[in-house]
Image: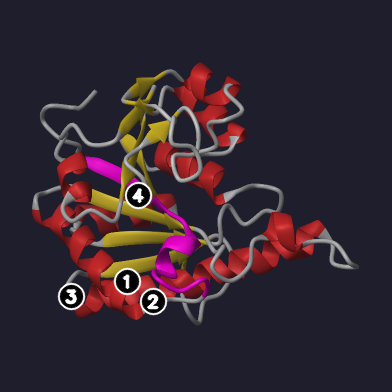
Amino acid sequence: MSKQDGYRRILLKLSGEQLAGKSKSGIDPEFVGWLAEEIKKVVDVGAQVVIVVGGGNFVRGASFSGHGLERATADYMGMLATIINGLALMDMLESKSQPTRLQTNLTLPQVAEPFIRRRAIRHMEKNRVIIIAGGLGKPFITTDTAAVSVALELGCETVMKATKVNGVFTKDPTEHDDAEFLENLSYEEAIKNPDIQIMDKAALGLAMEHKMPIIVFDLLKEDNLVKAAQGGNIGSRIG
């Protein structure tokens, strides 16, 4: 399932909930500091890194709408939450001596660069980590779909979807003891199986259309990220 020579350029998809660490919401500075060190290891071995971050630790648009709040408004609130996460991750990476740039698909020049494809590529060529916040700048599109779209636009070789479990299972392993680990599965299997909810179906469909491989791995295990980036047999591969 691995790429023997490692990956030249990867997209790391982080959920907002992961940045909450041991808390139920907000940002856990201790965890984000540890995560920054794990990301820096990937750059240190020669890979270029772009990160798309979610905002569910503050606002999840799909579940926040209603009661007079329109879905589009809730989604924009979620996009703003991703920028809060991006700022925290950027500063933490910089504190670990890892040059980082935050770009966003929303217009917020006081806090982030606009997302410009060629500029993002130049940053990565200079060994800077790029964080893309604000999703794609449009409502009704998840950050999973944004991650696949950005990976394609920036010429990434894989999307690495960070989770809290070893990879993809036939069922949620935190709720079902009989869940079976799937080391390799096709896009079709991931899309058609209702018990596999590792990414939304639109994101998987876009990846399938353009043959973008997705690696699903346990982010919480030390060195898993750098091993996956080096082509190690880590987690599950979709594609």
The picture quadrant where one finds residue 96 is bottom left
Which mark lies nearer to you, 3 or 1? 1
Which mark lies nearer to you, 1 or 4? 1
Residue found 54% across the figure and 51% down from its top: 143
Helix, strand or loop status at disc 2: loop
Query: Could you tell which of marks 2 and 4 lies nearer the N-terminus?
Result: 4
Query: Could you tell which of marks 2 and 3 lies nearer the N-terminus?
Result: 2
Q: Magenta stretch: give its range.
A: 8-25
The location of residue 63, given as percent across then percent down, is 72, 57
Residue found 39% across the figure and 76% down from its top: 28
Helix, strand or loop status at disc 3: loop
Residue found 31% across the figure and 50% down from its top: 121
Q: Which residue is mark 1?
A: 32
Q: Which mark is residue 28?
A: 2
Left-right relation of 174 to 41:
right
Between the C-alphas of marks 1 and 4, the distance is 14 Å
As shown in the figure, which amino acid type bears the numbered disc 2? Asp
Pointers 1 and 2 in contact (CB under 8 A)? Answer: yes
Q: Is residue 211 visible?
A: yes
Left-right relation of 92 to 230:
right
Q: Which residue is mark 4?
A: 12
Q: Which residue is mark 3?
A: 96
Q: Residue furthest right?
A: 68
Helix, strand or loop status at disc 1: helix
